Amino acid sequence: MSGPRRRSRLSRGSLGNIEEKMARIAFIGGTGPEGLGLAMRFGKVEGNDIFIGSRSQERAEAAAEKVKGKVPQARVRGLLNAEAVEKAEFVFLTVPWEAHKETLESLAEVIGNKILVDVAVPMVWEEGGPRIVQVEEGSAAQQARAVASRAKIVSGFHHLDGHDLQKIDRPMQGDVIVCGDHKPAKKKVLELVEEIEYVRALDGGPLANSYLTEAWTYILVQLNRTYKAHTGIRIVGI
Amino acid sequence: MSGPRRRSRLSRGSLGNIEEKMARIAFIGGTGPEGLGLAMRFGKVEGNDIFIGSRSQERAEAAAEKVKGKVPQARVRGLLNAEAVEKAEFVFLTVPWEAHKETLESLAEVIGNKILVDVAVPMVWEEGGPRIVQVEEGSAAQQARAVASRAKIVSGFHHLDGHDLQKIDRPMQGDVIVCGDHKPAKKKVLELVEEIEYVRALDGGPLANSYLTEAWTYILVQLNRTYKAHTGIRIVGI
């Protein structure tokens, strides 16, 4: 779990060009805490290229500057959403629920058959606190599949706290449970998860399970409020 | 987390009779792995009275013998379900989903306004593996409230592995997330949870959240199959 992460990734084999092993990762909605935090963690890994997408070039560039402020060595650029998607192999969707469907509709064509990592949680904030939203398709990830129908949809990263992610000098705690039906894409995402030091990737089964991992976030948010904490999940016994 | 558990419980105060501090706990469906395991753990605590309920006196007594085999000092008896309920302050419901509603219907009157701890998970086993069942009332716990309408319903203990519970010489890992609307009853159950050494009790909010904690068991069961493990949950960050 320690030492240079890049080396461990390379040591997994392949005689190919080293450059091909570096991940090109876009964060759509990368100006929020979760997208920013993940961009910082992945930006720490040597060789990764990070593209922060926004509907506003200015906000995208400001977010990229924030990442560089925390991770000076990061290779990170702020771009319009569609440009960020175009450059990436992994497209992370880290938008608030209210923007989920609309964002996907506007980007589905440029996403094409790329790997789309949906981090969205169908939850809205109201005066009294958070409220779960019932999704017609069953879950955020299944809505993503319905809209971006050619993409390889994988869901995960819901349980890593955005503010903790941005404290990049502290190790993250917790597991990332990944769901998906496209096995090679899920495998790539499981490998990507473990680039974040001390975070463990677990295979949560098919995409149809994603409503459970998404909804679990709702309990974490409630625990955060009850215990004034930033919570995550660790699966014990594995 | 160490030392005699009973002492720490007594030290919580009250000038009343010591006997009143001891918990009388019934396990309906206490012949299965979860009920047996919990009976063993609570049987380890000095002064607790454990009543294992079954539809068959013979099976109840056999289960009580199993508990004594592992925990010789346990004060445990095997009884018919209704008799076990009558004697208890806390009634744990640890039946398979198929028996949930029927068992409640047959015992609702004797349960009365006692504390009912629902451990049931709306899940059935089929040839291909486990399947989640949609519950009309929203969750197992809400079904319990609909049927045993005078009882103080609290849900919890879904994520402690039944087989691990029975390995009584090993500490349990993981958290128990407790949901309920009756605050004094929930508080009592939260205290009861921590009689199991190393297990932490967390308040998961209202009973309406129980469908999330129940359903999470489904992911744990899938992880158990994928990783050949006995899993539980630990919330990090608290």
Image: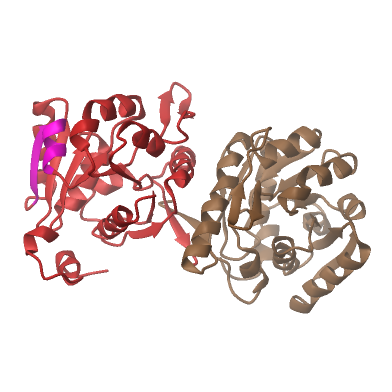
Chain colours: A brown, B red
Horizontal side, residue B16 vs residue A203: left or right: left
Give the image location of residue B200, x and y in percent: 35, 61
Relative vertical location of residue A177 with respect to residue A32 in this rendering, above or below: above
What's the residue at 72%, 40% (across, down)?
A153
What's the residue at 41%, 47% (across, down)?
B231
Residue at 51% over, 53% down: A219
Is residue A117 in the magenta section?
A: no
Q: State the image coordinates of residue B156 (x, y, percent, origin top left).
A: 35, 47
Find residue A27 and report its image quarter. bottom right
Q: Nearer the viewer, residue A16 or A216?
A: A216
Whether the magenta-drawn stretch holds residue B84 is answered as: yes
Q: Is residue B119 above or below residue A85?
A: above
Residue drawn at (47%, 38%), measured in percent from left and top?
A: B218
Residue A5, image quadrant: bottom right
Q: Is residue A226 left or right of residue B3?
A: right
Q: Quadrant of the N terminus of chain B?
A: bottom left
B8 or B147: which is nearer to us? B147
Instruction: From this view, report whether residue A212 is shown above or below residue A127.
Output: above
**Which residue occupies the extreme top position in the image?**
B127
Any part of residue B65 in sight: no
Give coordinates of residue B210: x percent, y percent: 44, 44
Query: Observer-nearest residue: A134 or B53?
Result: A134
Pick the residue in front: A61 or A189. A61
User: Quarter of the image holding residue B170?
Assistant: bottom left
**Residue A184 visible to the viewer:** yes
Q: Position of residue A57 (x, y in %)?
A: 93, 63
The magenta region covers B74-87
